[in-house]
Image (spheres, rainbow, N blue to C red):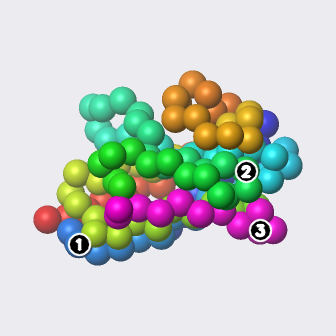
Amino acid sequence: QVQLVESGGGLVQAGGSLRLSCAASGRTFSNNAMGWFRQAPGKEREFVAAISRSGDITDYADSVKGRFTITRDNAKNTVYLQMNSLKPEDTAVYYCAADRVPFIRIQTVAYDSWGQGTQVTVSS
């Protein structure tokens, strides 16, 4: 497994931006795809974005396309989520996750390592 630590969450006004970071250790970071998920109160955890092991392929949930960007720096064992034009409905705990394979998957059950989560709150 991979140990993951998220940072960068916080409180922001609607229309603002935040950048989440996820530092990985353990299993070789560059071998596997990475993803970001989120969970709002009373709702199931949902897919937000994913990136292949090399970073050349990405995928996004429809609700964040055009506003969020996932990137990774394999030299730093870190994956990022740049969030722009934030909306109140983006409020959730955001989780970083590591997959067991190098290609993108969006199913929560595909990921075997999870961070502790970071809270993002967007005020209207």
Question: What type is the residue that disc 3 sits on?
Answer: Lys
**Residue 100, located in which quarter of the rendered image?**
top right
Considering every residue shown, the one lying at the far front of the view is 56
Considering every residue shown, the one lying at the far left of the view is 124
Horizontally, residue 122 falls left or right of residue 39, namely left
How far apart, in angstroms, are the residues tagged by discs 3 and 1?
Answer: 29 Å
SS under mark 1: loop
How far apart, in angstroms, are the residues tagged by discs 2 and 1?
Answer: 31 Å
* Nearer to us: label 2 or label 3: 2
Q: Is residue 93 above or below residue 71?
A: above
Question: Residue 90, image x and y in percent?
Answer: 29, 53
The answer to whether residue 96 is seen in the rendering is no
Quadrant showing the C terminus: bottom left
Residue marked by disc 3? 76
Residue marked by disc 2? 53
Q: Is residue 10 above or below residue 96?
A: below
Quadrant showing the N terminus: top right
Q: Earlier in the sequence, mark 2 or mark 3?
A: 2
SS under mark 3: loop
Residue located 77% across and 63% down the image: 74
Bounds of the magenta segment: 66-76
Horizontally, residue 6 falls left or right of residue 30, namely left
Residue marked by disc 1? 15
Question: Residue 119, image x and y in percent?
Answer: 41, 55
Question: Residue 12, image x and y in percent?
Answer: 29, 71
Question: What type is the residue that disc 1 sits on?
Answer: Gly
